[in-house]
Image (cartoon, rainbow, N blue to C red):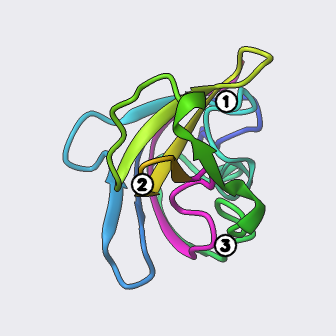
Amino acid sequence: MNQTVLADSLVTLHYRISLPNGQPLISTFEATPATLRLGAGEMLPAMEKLIIGLPVGSRHVFELEPDEAFGPRRPELVERVKREHMLSREVEAMSIMEFVAPDGAKYSGFVREVDEASALIDFNHPLAGKAIRLEVDIIGAVSA
């Protein structure tokens, strides 16, 4: 019986996310495969849709436009934050900082630039606005 990936499957797979020019960003092919529960928020919904229905043992490559991948870059998610509102006084440009919202949620932001009084923080996902290439090798799938 040929197994296929279902919407609620526990899937073991190798995956590689790269830019359309082939520059690799994330890959499990050189290491341990990932095991993810579909529908549990462990993978982007658009990526889940692509692998549902794929047979175990198959390998596929998908090209995703920014809207299908990590979404468009949103200028409103880039904001200047005063140093007095930062948990850490040591702020370096081109680094990632964690922020805690009033509701207790944690957010990571990329520090684009720093001056004496503030820092320009980008809260967009690092791949927002970028097309990506997704390569998957489906190793196993168990339905819940």
Mark 2–mark 1 Cα distance, whole angstroms, equals: 45 Å
Mark 2–mark 3 Cα distance, whole angstroms, equals: 28 Å
* Camera-side residue of 34 and 132: 132
| Residue at 19 percent of width and 47 percent of height | 30
Label 1 vs 3, first from the N-terminus: 1
Q: Quadrant of residue 97?
A: top left
From the viewer's perspective, is 126 left or right of 80?
left
* Camera-side residue of 144 and 123: 123
Which quarter of the figure is the N terminus placed in?
top right
Q: Is residue 133 magenta?
A: yes
Give the amino acid at mark 3: Pro
Q: Where does the magenta region start and end?
A: 121-143
Residue 41 in percent (x, y) is at 70, 32
Q: Secondary structure at mark 1?
A: loop
Would you name the residue on which mark 3 appears? 66
Would you name the residue on which mark 1 appears? 9
Residue 115 in percent (x, y) is at 42, 55
Q: Quadrant of residue 89?
A: top left
Label 2 vs 3, first from the N-terminus: 3
Residue 126 in percent (x, y) is at 51, 58
Whether tag 1 and tag 3 are in contact, CB under 8 A, the answer is: no
Would you name the residue on which mark 2 appears? 114
Q: Secondary structure at mark 3?
A: loop
| Residue at 32 percent of width and 46 percent of height | 92
Extreme top residue here?
Answer: 104
Mark 2 residue crowding within 10 angstroms, few (<14) / some (14–19) / many (20+): some
From the viewer's perspective, is 15 left or right of 80?
left
| Residue at 31 percent of width and 45 percent of height | 28
Give the amino acid at mark 1: Ser
Extreme bottom residue here?
Answer: 21
